[in-house]
Image (cartoon, coloured by chain):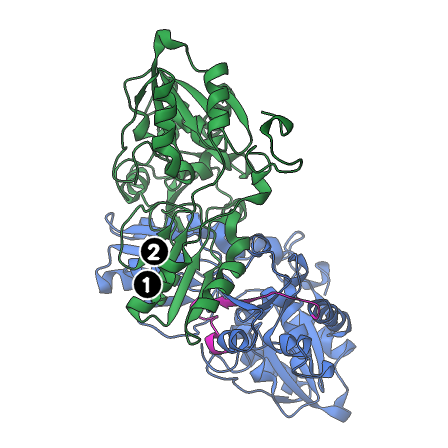
Chain colours: A blue, B green
Amino acid sequence: MSQESSGRPAGDLSKTGMSLKHDREWDYELDRIVDAVEERDAETVGLQFPEGLKRRGPGVADDLRGSLPEDVSVLISGQPCYGACDLDTYLMKRTDVFVHFGHSPMKESEKIIYVPLFSNVDVFPILERALDEELAEPADDDVGLVTTAQHMNKFEEMREFLEDRGYTVHTRRGDERLTHEGQVLGCNYASAEVDADQVLYVGGGKFHPLGLAMEHPEKRVVIADPVNNAVSVADTEKFMKQRYAAVHKAMDAETWGVIFCTKIGQGRWEKAEEIVENNGDAYLITMDEITPDRLRNFGMDAYVNTGCPRITTDDGPQFHAPMLTPGEYEIAVGEKPLDELSFDTFQGTW
Amino acid sequence: MSQESSGRPAGDLSKTGMSLKHDREWDYELDRIVDAVEERDAETVGLQFPEGLKRRGPGVADDLRGSLPEDVSVLISGQPCYGACDLDTYLMKRTDVFVHFGHSPMKESEKIIYVPLFSNVDVFPILERALDEELAEPADDDVGLVTTAQHMNKFEEMREFLEDRGYTVHTRRGDERLTHEGQVLGCNYASAEVDADQVLYVGGGKFHPLGLAMEHPEKRVVIADPVNNAVSVADTEKFMKQRYAAVHKAMDAETWGVIFCTKIGQGRWEKAEEIVENNGDAYLITMDEITPDRLRNFGMDAYVNTGCPRITTDDGPQFHAPMLTPGEYEIAVGEKPLDELSFDTFQGTW
């Protein structure tokens, strides 16, 4: 759909997807926050934004200050934040109302107000293109549908859109880690376990559809990315090569750093402990943010990350030594055959 | 003193200072740790090392495992650590014995074992040179003596060394933040408030003597650096220019990020709160590690750091926007005249 044919004024790119990278409007649900402050007679409000929205922090704080009694203090979390698994527990414990923006609830709590910040990008033009270009024809009219928290508010409309065009849409809610039917996380694709050979993923980024395709190798994963206005089919080959390269490199390791992540929703203590107990060359390292700088100081030969899988697989190449998922570690030390390499997911709740 | 004239074999650089950068031996006081584990019937031991010694973590863990009952788990902190003000409280709370290496106690606690890791570098050759080259002659035979935690074990010997050569040595213990007489921290130079116009600083690095000279501008600060085998006089001019440049740049700021550091020994809540209460363009940001990456996401025009002054003054130029100390902030917003620029120190306990 070109700008002209949409009947909107020139320069109005608000529904093309492309422009919205720079021009999104979010609903910060300030009224809900103000109500909570009044109800709880709160003196302090903590705000936590994901990385891409931290820049909006001062504006949101300004608007809140304008609506709140003067003696209420607004504090902004400066901790990195990559999901609802990544709550700033320090700030949460020390404020009367704690608002987590941009993710759907992973753990319900009376203390936390989750403001999802649904995208207002129009997903339907790109759905149309995905249907035209990549989704299998009515001969195979079963399709799974998944999306990210950002687009969950359009989920039922997307389902109807597909049904109107003759598809049988299969959806499910994953496990307790997921709030919504059809929702995927970077570490959980349980909602794609549906009775369809093709799954339509609607959302931005490469990481989610890659994990999805790795976790469900028997399915064709069609990506409809409304943010970058692009349709494609997930291809795990390059990714698999990278992972195998890391596993092979780690096979020579004489020292292993086993990372237990201390973030509230990213800890897998049993996995970390099990590895260290069974490997005399493994050392347990506890930390919140897992960064190349932090690990470089330890200078170990290889690392196993039991925390967020995105760090391992997305940031992995930036580390000075190979960083593996727990499953990849088992392959590297010979406990599992090479061909059992799979994506690392968090199942169940935290 | 050349290697040859020392009468030691060629290649033995163990007392020249230079070689010891690569070849130090530390006393990790493993017996004391093992005793504590037995006494407390501990099941978990947490180890925290400063950045430069993290590489020794696995070796220390190995030695401990060899001496401890098999069911005792050893965990290593992966959090950055820059002082005794920077305890890994997560690991501390979750282990039965918590060992903090490399710094002297700031807060005594039954839970924490502080292992100071005194340097075994010979400080006397460089003291001799400092006397020859930079210390004022007997006409002014008063001298203050300060050093860092690393060399505290030689403090009384250093005092005697100076007294034997005719100096009247002035020392004092600073305030509660300091463990030892004559000790300085990067954020506290109270031990140099002595009745002498010259102060001899024995230790590595540029940051401590610079802070010392800023805090005591009326004194001549002679640096005897036994690690880099160098003698010099602290020169604050370049540093002051940098600070004034940051202050001037910040004068145009329309948005201010005011950082409250959540590290256990680095929080100055009142300072942070005061600034935010009196400036409608200031926003309170809470975080532990203060890094350029973390602040870039907020994109504010200027920052005030109420946490560790080393971050502000040493790392300052790496941030995308000027970062000021609380005192510098007052100058930038016109609350204090330009010529009152001074070093930022933590007084009193945390």
Q: Are marks 1 and 2 in contact (CB under 8 Å)?
A: yes
Name the N-terminal-most of marks 1 and 2: 1
Relative to the observer, which residue lies in front, A220 or A285?
A285
User: Residue lying farthest top?
Assistant: B139
Q: Which SS class for mark 1?
A: helix
Prevalent SS, magenta region: loop
Q: Amino acid at mark 2?
A: Ile
Q: Amino acid at mark 1?
A: Ala
Residue B224 versus residue A315 in the image, above or below: above
Relative to the observer, which residue lies in front, A102 or A1?
A102
Which chain does the numbered disc 1 sit on? B
Residue B122 highlighted magenta (yes or no): no
Give coordinates of residue B43: x percent, y percent.
37, 72
Q: Which mark is residue A24?
A: none
Give coordinates of residue A235: x percent, y percent.
75, 74
Q: Which mark is residue B36?
A: 1
Q: Which SS class for mark 2?
A: strand
Residue B166 versus residue B331 in the image, above or below: above
Magenta segment, which residues? A251-270
The quadrant of the picture occupied by the C terminus of chain A is: bottom left
Q: Residues within 10 Å of mark 2 (few under 14, many from 20)?
A: some
Which is in the foreground here, disc 1 or disc 2?
Answer: 1
A12 left or right of B338? right
- Give the quadrant of residue B350: top left
Query: Circle 2 is placed at which residue position?
Result: B113
